[in-house]
Image: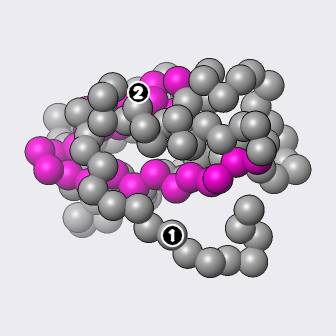
Amino acid sequence: MLRVEKFSDGIAINGDSTSKEVLQEIKSHLGEEQVHLIVTDPPYGNVVPEDWDRWTGDQKSFADWLLSWTRTYSDLLVPNGAMYVWGGYGTPGFRPFYEYYARVENETSLKVSNLITWSKRRAY
């Protein structure tokens, strides 16, 4: 389920916002406006034992999926806007975030400026 909350200086969207229908709904909330910041936390792909994190394809197809919605969202950003994408290391033999990270500058309008890491209990 998608939740949209409007603020005086932006909107917050919580839910699976990668489907074409949901992307259209997001665009309808924005109209012609662009945003300064997008923060996403997509599934990492087979890292946690939850249905929402299951991916049955290969690493390339997962990276392709990440790039598909990244392209769409990057079009919503103002020039020099920022997009944060949380990602995980993956598991041995399946590390799609590294492939995504390596391709993002070549296949989108975004430029990678930094990696943010933290130590947390469930880090893999």
Protein image colouring:
one colour
Name the residue carrying label 1.
117
Name the residue carrying label 2.
24
Q: In this view, does 105 lie to the left or right of 122?
A: left
Q: In this view, does 112 lie to the left or right of 96?
A: left
Query: In the image shown, does 122 or 21 lie closer to the viewer?
Result: 122
Pointer 1 local density, CA inside 10 Å: few below 14, some 14–19, many at least 20: few
Contact check, label 2 and label 1, Cβ < 8 Å: no
Q: Position of residue 13 (x, y in %)?
A: 47, 52
Could you tell me which secondary element the residue under label 1 belongs to?
Answer: loop
Query: In the image shown, does 113 or 79 lie closer to the viewer?
Result: 113
Type of amino acid at the residue the image marks with label 2:
Gln
Which quadrant does the N terminus fall into? top right
Circle nearer the N terminus (2, 1): 2
Which span is picked out in magenta? 64-91
Residue drawn where x is 88% and y is 50% of the image = 49
